[in-house]
Each structure stands twice: as C-alpha cells, then as structure tokens.
Image (cartoon, coloured by chain):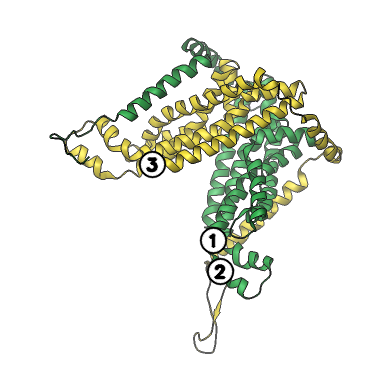
Chain colours: A yellow, B green
Amino acid sequence: MSAAGALPGGPAGGELRRWQRFTPLERVARTGFYLFALLAVLWALRTIEIIPEFLYDAPHQTVDLFARMWPIDWSWYPKVVHAALMETLHIATLGTILAVALAAPVALLVATNITHSVILNTFGKFILVATRSVHSIMWALFFVAVFGPGALAGMLAIAVHSIGFTGKFLSEAIEEARPGPIEALKAVGAPPLAILIKGYWPQVKPAFLALAIFRWDINIRESAVLGLVGGGGLGMALDTALSNLYWDQAGLVLFVIFVVVIATEIVTTTIRSRIL
Amino acid sequence: MSAAPARRVAFPPNWPARIGALVLLAYVAYASTILDITWARFLIGLEHGQRFISRMFPPDFAPDKIELLYNGMLESLQIAILATVFGTLISLPLGIAAARNLSPLPVAWIARLVIVIARTFHPVIIAILFVKAVGFGTLAGVLALTVASIGFVSKLVADAVEETSMKQIEAVRSTGAPFLGIIVMGLIPQVLPRFIGFTAYELDSNLRNSALVGIVGGGGIGATLFTAFQRFDYDFVLTIVLTIIVLVMIGEIISGAMRRLFQ
C-alpha cells in the first residue's frame, strides 16, 4: 500500500519507474509531524514531576486499597446508596431532556438551510463549542456556587454541557434533510412553523431519538461523579464515604456505578437496535 | 391500511407519540418534585448567579496568577501527552487481542472484559483510586487518563480490526509468516490510518480530562482551578476557564489537522 514499489520496463535505459502514494509535500508534513510528536513526548517525559517515594510505595498502597474495600459494606445500600442512585438516574434523565430542549433552538440557529445568516450561524456554533469545551464537572462547580449544592446544580451542569454535543449532531441531521418535502410544503403555502413540524421533524426524528438516547447513556456516567463537587447523586455518597475513609462503603458505590453503567449500556444498545 | 377510508386525512393524529409526550411531561413534573427543583429556587439562584458573574469580571491577569496558570497548563499538557502515548500504545495490542476474527475466543473475551472495566468508570473515579495508590500529583493523573484512554481506544481498535479485510492477512499467512509478521505486515497497514485518527481524538479528549483529574488530586490545571474556586478567587477562575477553552480549541484544530494528514 504505502511502500514505494518499482516496476520493470519504464522509460528507455532500463530506468525504474517509482510509484509513490504521497506527494513530496505530504511526506515532509508526515515526517515533520512524527518528529514533532517525538519531541513532545520526550519533553513531557523529561520535565514531568514524579515523587519517587510515592512510586516506591505504590504496590503496597494498592494492595491496602483493595484490602480496605473488601468486604463491601452491603448494609449501606438501603440506608444511603439507593436514594443516591435514584437521584443520579433522575439527574441524568432530566438533564438530557432539558439538554435536547435547549439544544433544539441552537441547532436551528446553526443549520445553514434554516437560518440564512452567517452571523447567527457563527453565534450558534460559538454556543455549541463553548458549552462543550467546559466539562460537566466544571459546570457543576459553577452551578453549585450559584444554586447551592444539590441535584438542581447537577442537573443544570449535565444539561448545559450536553448542549454542545446534542446541538452539533442535531444541526447536522437538519442540514441533511431532503429538500423535497420542504418544497412541497412551501408550495402549498405552509407557515414556517408548519414546515418545521411537518417537513423537517419527521426526517430528523430518528436521528434525534438516537442522539437523545446516546447522550442519556453518557450522562448517566457523568452524573455519577458530579456529586464529588456537590452536584448530588452517587458522587455525593462516594464523597461522604471517601472523606470518612470508609473504603468498604466507597467500594459499594463503585460497584453500584459499575452495574448501573453496564445496565444502561445494554438498555441503550437494545433500544437503538430496535428504533434504527 | 387495506380498506381505504373515504377521505384521506393529510396528517393523521399520532396517538402513541402524543401519549409518549404526556408520559414524558408527567415524568419531568414527578422527577422535579423528587429532586426539589422549584421555580423559586431557580430565581434565588439567578440572583446569586448575577453576583457570582460580576465577581468574575474582569478576569485576573496578575503576574503571579499567570505563573500559576502557566505551570498548571504545562502540567496538564504533560499529563495529556503521556496518557495518550501510554494509553494508545497499550490499546493496540489489547485491541488486537479483543478482535474476535484474529485472536482465540477465550483471549478475546478476557481482553473485552478488561476493556469494559476500563471504560465503565469515569476518569475522575479512576483518578481517585490512583491518588490513593500513588499519591497526589501528576503521576496519578497520567495513570488515570491512561486507563481511561485504554478503555476508549482499544474498543475502537478492536472494532477496526474486526472490519479489516482477511485477504491481505491470508496472503501474508500463506508465505509462512509467523503471527507477529502477520500482524505487522498484514494488519497494521490496514488499521494504521484509523488508529492515528483515534490517537488524535484521544489527545483531544485527554486534554479536556486533564483539567478534571486535578480536582481530585491528580495534578495539572484542575488542581489550580479547584484551589481558586475554594479560595473564592472567581476572577482567576474565569481566567483559567477561558485558557482551558482556548487550549481545548487549539487541541481540536491540531487533532483535526492530524486526522486530515493521515486519512
């Protein structure tokens, strides 16, 4: 594939014709990139600060960690963890619903076949990139400072962070809609809202549902850790257990998170294979 | 419908969808009460938010803060680079081991189990465990993000390997090449462009996540950010967040260029 092969019987003089996949510029760019990557890794390796005593101690500490977690404190589940688990599920679900509700108008703003204004498109894109670049935990830090610790802050963090992802793919789905039904609706004099609901929505619906379900899956994972900064749910239980140094309770929370994440993944893949 | 009605309705009401929407609405109302989300709380929060945002402006660019920012960013960059390198280097063999068309089934299932475990936990949770195991600092961050990268990249590698054409692999095998020869000459050229694409994506996502692991003690800009939050230095918080956004965008541009170069 990429190797420079030689064929016999080129131009006169028995000179071989060389076949090359890449132009010289591409090869220079690639070699330069490899060099740059190598330098970056070397720089990171040489300058990173690692405390040798900690490294020396690591195997002992790791064994200690698992020894403290075992046996898992199952009796803590009905007391605290069950309520926290329910809260996490509600945070993720409500957050996803709010996210798609917030992302839909932004996606309409970004889709070039709906909004014929470069300024508005760029503004929408800025919203998408800005919400996506700040991680949900950072949004949670912000919303905890604003609304106080609790599920409200966690839910808003999930919702706002999801806008970028959902809006991006939703706007792409809108842009891919076929113009035929839309022109038919325009021809009979349908108002813009009717065009949106009866022309675009049926075409976008499968992508929209798949997107919402995919994001819900991601959000369950994320909402499980928001509690570490005060966003409610399982993370809060984990934080309590960790600050009390009850590792057997922390082990229980980790186990619950593991089970929930696997279960959600199975559920979402089943739903997706049904509706798609 | 076989028996055509006398008059066709252009847009017949879709009852399942309407009922679904009602159920969704009922759930939102129910869950909001459970979580104690009320309009009054929201309004009080908006007031707080106004004060909060006014304290963020103008962002703090004092020289000592800039130095903190610079050091934190460098550390985050180191964490992201090293985690990407280690993570993807481990992911390649692990992903090949998990591909059901090349490895024996028991090996594939064990490799898949490892991948699932690495992928299930959020990087922050893995970071908590590593902070306990190897202490506070960048090493915990690097290890946590390495594990997270393994979970993500090896699954993609496994899928890519399962999609490769067996013809080239059989051609190499027919020359009597050993297993390693088959992998290097038959398989790697087929998956390399996609692998580099995954690496680019992972560098991007590790850069984002390296800002997180610091919150639980994993070093990097996240530690600086969390400290600033706890000291109510909200103007410095804004500086850090803006810098992170810019850095993530630069990372996105670089990884996009990297993918175009190798596709």
Residue, x 54% and y 88% (percent of image)? A14
Q: Quadrant of residue B148?
A: top right
**Residue type (three-letter) at the residue carrying disc 1:** Thr
**Residue tagged by mark 2?**
B168
Picture disc at residue B164: 1
Q: Amino acid at mark 2?
A: Gln
Residue B254, image x, y percentages: 56, 48
Q: Which quadrant: the N terminus of chain B?
A: top left
Q: Tell me if residue B62 comes above or below residue B162 in the rendering.
A: above
Structural distance between the alpha carbons of marks 1 and 3: 29 Å
Q: Camera-side residue: A70 or A176? A: A70
Check whether the beta carbons of the residues at disc 2 and disc 1 lie within 8 A of each other.
yes
How far across and down, in percent of the image, does residue B30 sit? 47, 17
Residue beneath disc 3: A173
Is there one chain holding both mark 2 and mark 1? yes
Q: Position of residue B240 (x, y in %)?
A: 62, 30
Q: Quadrant of residue A201?
A: top left
Local crowd at mark 2 within 10 Å, few (<14), some, or many (≥20)?
Answer: some
The answer, for residue A1, to whether it is visible in the render is: no
Residue farthest to the left?
A: B6
- Label 2 is found on which chain of the structure? B
Q: Secondary structure at mark 1?
A: loop
Between A219 and A153, the one nearer to me in the picture: A219
Q: Would residue B219 appear left or right of A263 to someone viewing this image?
A: right
- Relative to A46, is A198 on the left or the right? left
* Amino acid type assigned to the residue bearing label 3 in the image: Ala
Question: Which mark is drawn over residue B185?
Answer: none
How far apart marks 2 and 1 lie (CA) works out to 9 Å
Q: What chain is tagged by disc 3?
A: A
